[in-house]
Amino acid sequence: MDIPHHQALSKYEKVELISLGILLPIGIITWALSLLLDQTALYWFDDELVYFHGVASYFVSPFWFAVAAAAFSHFVLSKFQVTYRNSQKIKAICVVTCFFSTLSAVWFAFELNHYF
C-alpha cells in the first residue's frame, strides 16, 4: 500500500471511512464490553461459537478490541498522510494482540491449563 497523498477522499472512501472505520469499531467495542461486563467472551472454532467465562474471558476478549482497533487504523488513520505511520504501528500491535488472545482461547477452550 502506498503512502496516501493530499488528494481529497472519494465518496466511496468517505462511506468506507464512516461505516467500516468508525461505526463498525464502535459496534464491536460496545458488544465486547457488554459481554465483558458479564465476564463472558466469545470466540469461534471450526464454525462453532465458544463462550468463555470468568478469568478466561479477560484473556480472550482483547481479540475483539484489537480487531476494532485494526479496523479503525486501516479505514481511518491510514487514509491520511499525517497518521499513516501511526496506523502501521497500531496494526502491528493489533496483530500481536490477536495472536496472543487466540493462543489464550485455544489454551482455555481445550483446558490445557489442567496439564501444567
Image: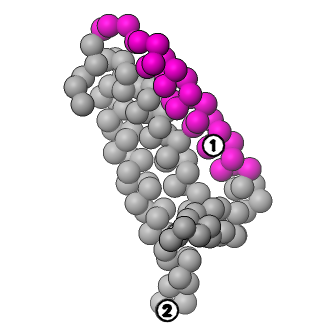
Asked where in the image residue 7 lies, by quadrant, the reply is: top left
Q: Which residue is mark 2?
A: 115
**Figure label count:** 2
Does the magenta-highlighted stretch encompass residue 28? yes
Residue 57 is situated, as x and y percent measured from the top left of the image, at: 63, 65
In this rendering, is residue 36 above or below 12? below
Q: Is residue 3 above or below residue 30?
A: above
**Who is closer to the viewer here, 23 or 97?**
23
- Image point (49%, 25%), residue name: 16
Q: Residue 8, located in which quarter of the rendered image?
A: top left
The secondary structure type at the circle numbered 1 is helix
Residue type marked 1: Ile
CA separation in Å, label 1 and label 2: 33 Å
Residue lying at the far bottom in this picture: please name it: 115
Q: Position of residue 69 (x, y in %)?
A: 49, 40
Q: Position of residue 51 (x, y in %)?
A: 66, 68
Q: Amino acid at mark 2?
A: Tyr
Q: Which residue is mark 1?
A: 29
Looking at the image, what colour scheme do you see?
one colour
- Magenta range is 6-34
